[in-house]
């Protein structure tokens, strides 16, 4: 089986046309015409992940985050990005990123978060209008909102999030003293969706990368829960694996054993 069989299927679920303007999804190194020896799935593509791919005879790394966001002017090996690219090319490893295009589909990153938190009746939080894939039956866009089977206290919900999302510590805005029933989520940096989360009627907004002054924008209308970027997207590896296993039952992609989270907690 050629690599393009895998990547073409992924693009049938999350077309590259759905990625945001700043993104760089798709092939970063290599290409689609090589025979697949194995696939390794990761959130980030680091040198350790490339080493793991070499050791496990995987010539395809499927990474959520692109190792290159903007153009490289030099490839000298002086930075971690350059070293990853050089090592991948030297060892004939294709690096393929599936990033905001996977964020923006209804079966993507945000649905995985909703499933983990036990949310139902899930809908896209901020719909992309006039997109080729947008229709009354298949909406695409950023974030997602859903409801808990049974409302719970804010403290109980915070503890639930901390446990399920394996968070070292939570950052959150002042509690509002009411039950949590409706929950908005966004994997990765989600501050741009705060107004949408409030407008949806959500009691809380689970996301990451809020800056200090942005927390004030919650303005006692919603509880913002910042769980960390990696933590919010950690289950994307399982999502990609499960999507591939559904289509290719005898194909067994590997999940990286490397924790690529650059943030540590004390």
Image: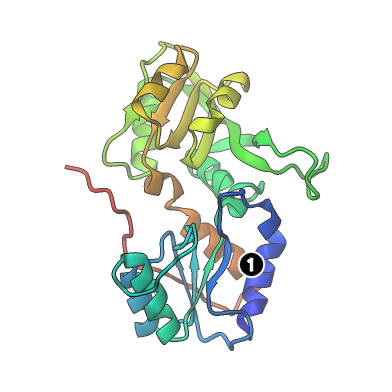
Task: Please state which of residues 39 and 121 is positioned toward the viewer in this rendering.
Answer: 39
Q: Position of residue 57 (x, y in %)?
A: 42, 86
Q: Position of residue 157 (x, y in %)?
A: 41, 28
**Residue positioned most to the left:** 266
**Residue positioned most to the front:** 73
**Residue positioned most to the right:** 136
> Residue at 40% of width from left, 37% of height from top?
209
- Would you name the residue on which mark 1 appears? 246
- Residue 14 appears in the picture as rendered: no
- The secondary structure type at the circle numbered 1 is helix
> Residue at 58% of width from left, 48% of height from top?
103
- Name the image quarter holding residue 121: top right
Task: Please state which of residues 241 and 2 is positioned toward the viewer in this rendering.
Answer: 2
Q: Position of residue 42 (x, y in %)?
A: 43, 64
> Residue at 59% of width from left, 87% of height from top?
34
- Residue 127 appears in the picture as rendered: yes
Task: State whether residue 151 is above or below residue 3.
Answer: above
For the C terminus, the image quarter is top left
């Amino acid at each position: 089986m050629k690599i393009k069989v895998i990547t073409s299927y992924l693009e049938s679920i999350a077309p590259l046309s759905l990625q945001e303007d700043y993104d760089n999804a798709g092939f970063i190194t290599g290409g689609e015409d090589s025979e697949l020896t194995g696939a390794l799935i990761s959130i980030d593509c680091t040198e350790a992940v490339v080493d793991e791919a070499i050791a496990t005879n995987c010539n395809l790394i499927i990474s959520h985050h692109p190792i290159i966001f903007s153009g490289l002017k030099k490839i000298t090996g002086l930075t971690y990005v350059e070293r990853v690219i050089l090592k991948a090319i030297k060892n004939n490893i294709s690096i393929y990123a599936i990033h905001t295009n996977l964020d923006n589909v209804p079966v993507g990153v945000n649905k995985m978060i909703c499933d983990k938190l036990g949310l139902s009746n899930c809908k896209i939080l901020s719909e992309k209008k006039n997109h080729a894939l947008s229709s009354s039956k298949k909406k695409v866009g950023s974030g997602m909102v859903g409801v808990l089977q049974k409302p719970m206290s804010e403290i109980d919900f915070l503890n639930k999030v901390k446990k399920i999302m394996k968070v070292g510590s939570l950052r959150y805005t002042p509690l509002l003293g009411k039950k949590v029933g409706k929950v908005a989520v966004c994997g990765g940096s989600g501050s741009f969706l705060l107004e949408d989360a409030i407008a949806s009627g959500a009691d809380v907004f689970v996301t990451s990368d809020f800056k200090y002054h942005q927390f004030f924008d919650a303005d006692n209308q919603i509880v913002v829960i910042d769980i960390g970027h990696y933590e919010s997207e950690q289950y994307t590896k399982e999502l990609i694996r499960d999507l591939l296993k559904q289509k290719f039952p005898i194909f067994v992609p590997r999940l990286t054993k490397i924790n690529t989270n650059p943030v540590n907690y004390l």
